[in-house]
Image (spheres, rainbow, N blue to C red):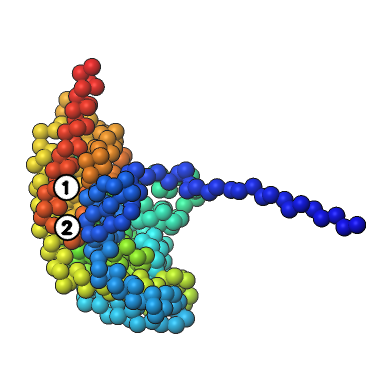
Amino acid sequence: MTVVESPRVLAQQTASLSPILKQATPVIVDHALGSWIHGTDGRDYLDFTTGIGVTSTGHCHPRVVAAAQEQCTRIIHAQYTTVMHPPLLELTDKLGAVLPMGLDSVFYANSGSEAVEAAVRLARMATAKPNIIVFQGGFHGRTVAAASLTTAGTRFSAGFSPLMGGVHMAPFPYAYRYGWDTDTAVDFALRELDYLLTSRVAPNDTAAFLIEPVLGDGGYLPTPPRFLAGLRERADRHGILLVVDEVQAGFGRTGKFWGHQHADGLTPDILITAKGLASGFPISAIAAPTELMSKAWPGSQGGTYGGNAVAAAAAVATLDVIDDEGLVENARVRGEQLLSGIREVTAGYDVVGDVRGLGLMVGIEFVARDGDATRPDAAAALAVQQATTRHGLLTLTCGPEGNVVRLIPALVVSDEEIAMGTKRFASALAEVAGERAHTDGS
């Protein structure tokens, strides 16, 4: 007699996202278009986060959507060191028209971190030097090498030491933090860089300077043009490469196509781009002169998904939209409107220490005051950021101490949307200020 065992009932498992992933807002997206996110809660939100500066042409721009849809009917993944595909060839050709003169060779990856690591690898291989000098407050990614280069907060690099060696930090000319004017801060930072090159990091052991044209997670701080020019001069004098991380500041966001172009006449040796490159599709790149790129060792560049066909098609469409719709100029004009408007509505609030920005990158730094002294007030920044969501405006915080609210509208943002966003920010700030005054008074 055969005994048939009853099938065992397997327990069902429920998965969830990592508890370490914290949402900046409670919004769940149903759909989005342009500068607007429409939530499953039935509310419409003006999006001044744009996926942390990624959806450069706004959400679901029809031309970007059409390009991606059409490419999906041809081929989705064509690994570009195995077989080549037309979108990547077209993208490379179009990038040549906007890249700084002389940066005529491009390597593609997926993320900003990957591109940063590729740039550092190239710099070390090309110069046969080990050291990289970064600047205080810079953010370059979360992978091991990129996190080793990041000084925008300990949370990005703590807990998995040892980090990559050969990284040295110099001061950034953060004028507000020091209580100085910009020129004094620049003089100080350049003087300290020279001292570092004399006392700790020999120039003939230094491969590159690595800097953002506007600090991103470090607090939305524009890098003064004279400081960038000082880096270029020292790089040339000492035989050091200047690597500019345009991951967040590039592709029109600052009101010029590249953020470093605010320093007239300056050209980096290696440029890094990602985020706004494809309006939301994952693709990144580094660009360098062919002679320099050729010094990378064989096999040192590659990756399974780098230069994905659909992402490349979306990037081609993104470049076309930016050009055809005049979005770089729109970023400049709308950025001036936003910066002026935010300065106006924050005037008179002691909790606001500084308002700064370049193009559509605007940061509001919150402080607590004790007489003439100030200290970072992360609680106020977070309270305002949360309040903006309640008022229908999506924003984010940043800064090493979390006390900066950053505004990152899409490049397609309109006059009316900037005015609306400014008004909603003002309402959120007034709400938080009123609550804090009531609490202090009680």
Instruction: Identify which residue is drawn at 33% across, 52% down.
Output: 29
- Circle 2 packing at 10 Å, graded few (<14), some (14-19), many (20+), is many
Q: Is residue 337 left or right of residue 61?
A: left
401, above or below 55, in the image = above
Residue 243 at least partly seen: no
x and y percentages locating residue 430 in the rendered image:
16, 33
x and y percentages locating residue 279 in the rendered image:
29, 64
Instruction: Identify which residue is drawn at 76% across, 52% down.
Output: 6
Q: Quadrant of residue 382?
A: top left
- Determine whether the residue tagged by mark 1 lies in a helix, strand or loop: helix
From the image, tell me which residue sits under label 1.
421
**Residue found at the very far top of the displayed protein:** 442
From the image, tell me which residue sits under label 2.
413
> Tag 2: residue type?
Val
Quarter of the picture holding the N terminus: bottom right
**Residue found at the very far right of the displayed protein:** 1
Q: Is residue 329 left or right of residue 178?
A: left
Q: Nearer the viewer, residue 118 or 409?
A: 409
x and y percentages locating residue 213 in the rendered image:
23, 58
Count of all numbered marks drawn on residues in the image: 2
Lower position in the chain sequence, tag 1 or tag 2: 2
Asked if disc 1 and disc 2 are in contact, CB closer than 8 Å, the reply is yes
